[in-house]
Amino acid sequence: MSIPATQKAVIFETNGGPLLYKDIPVPKPKPNELLINVKYSGVCHTDLHAWKGDWPLATKLPLVGGHEGAGVVVAMGENVKGWKVGDYAGVKWLNGSCNSCEYCQTTNEPNCPDADLSGYTHDGSFQQYATADAVHAARIPQGTDLALVSPILCAGITVYKALKTANLKAGQWVAISGAAGGLGSLAVQYAKAMGYRVVGIDGGSDKEEFAKSLGAEAFVDFTKVKDIPAEIQKITKGGPHGVINVSVSGGAMQQSIDYVRPTGTVVLVGLPAGASVNAPVFSSVVKSISIRGSYVGNRADSAEAIDFFTRGLIKCPIKVVGLSELPEVYELMEQGKILGRYVVDTSK
């Protein structure tokens, strides 16, 4: 395949600085890397944090954001095995890891201290050509709709891992905070596909209709309900067995400690800057609740999450816009106006 010397990308040179749609060089794959012609890339709330630089982990600068890139392998380094030009591949948040530390050896490679992160410490998928470690790049079946699968590469994998972390049984209740957002809309579907009963939490009648259309059995509108914990416990007859906090609201996370069922599990996923959760010792002990953080999935989680999608169990509601329109999508994320998931077409 003919590979150009330059490409279109959205890049920023300082945290919070202008998002520049411009020509930059096409990267050269290292011996262990694939070069992927990114066709589509989902836009994640993490991309907003990377741009603002408001997390306690520094980004590389200048930076091409994005970590939900779906495309086609066009070149590879000399040490790459098991891939060929023309394969469908995905650029995930975890771009690479050392593959030899304690965490990598125990299926916890996202926790590797030397993890390389797409769109954060490694130029990501808001460009037409991106590199990814061949060991960690996602394998996407041929014929898959690359626009629709792109959000699965972070949002889908992340919520699937969170649901596994909650350690629920089929028929049990799970509450999903932020149920109509980019992660939440996928969490509702994965939970339904895994056999759980879903109560969605979000604000607005349009979001209630959306969440229920995806499989939520019940919905709590935080803009209308005064006592949210009481309402959730009423619906679930004692509280949900698990709570998946994908919203970026520290208050919602704190509230979930109150309404989770005794012996239940609260899973923290969203990363609101500077937020903390206070777990009262007495009630936490007496209720025997668990509070667990869930980061991103490992390679097995990724393959399983993609398999749910390719079997038609997950329908990712997306809106496709051109890569040049990415700054406007960031504005919508800042304003909390995202319904579902935005995906950028790198050719526009």
Image: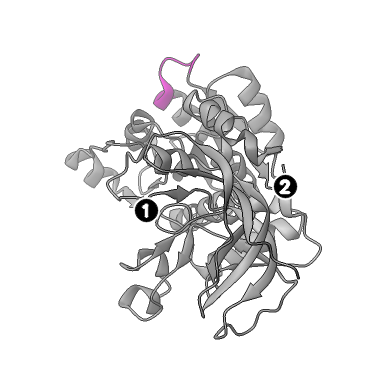
Label 1 sits on residue: 60
Which disc number belongs to residue 172? none
Q: Position of residue 106 (x, y in %)?
A: 39, 76
Q: Is residue 194 visible?
A: no
Amino acid type assigned to the residue bearing label 1 in the image: Lys
Q: Earlier in the sequence, mark 1 or mark 2?
A: 1
Q: Callout 1 environment at 10 Å: few (<14), some (14 to 19), or many (20+)?
A: some
Residue sitting nearer the eye, 189 or 28: 28
Q: Position of residue 73 (x, y in %)?
A: 68, 69
Residue 228 appears left or right of 276: right
- Quick one: quadrant of the C terminus? top right
Residue 2: in magenta span: no
Image position of 194 with respect to 255: above or below: below
Residue 117 appears left or right of 85: left
Q: Residue at x 78, y 67 (%)?
A: 142
Residue sitting nearer the eye, 138 or 283: 138
- Quick one: quadrant of the N terminus? bottom right
User: Rounded to the nearest whole Å, what is the CA distance between mark 1 and mark 2?
Assistant: 25 Å
Residue sitting nearer the eye, 327 or 313: 327
Amino acid type assigned to the residue bearing label 2 in the image: Ser
Label 2 sits on residue: 347
Q: Position of residue 257 (x, y in %)?
A: 33, 37
Which segment is the magenta one?
223-230
Image position of 69 with respect to 298: above or below: above
Image position of 21 with respect to 223: above or below: below
Q: Quadrant of residue 310?
A: bottom right
Determine whether the residue tagged by mark 2 lies in a helix, strand or loop: loop
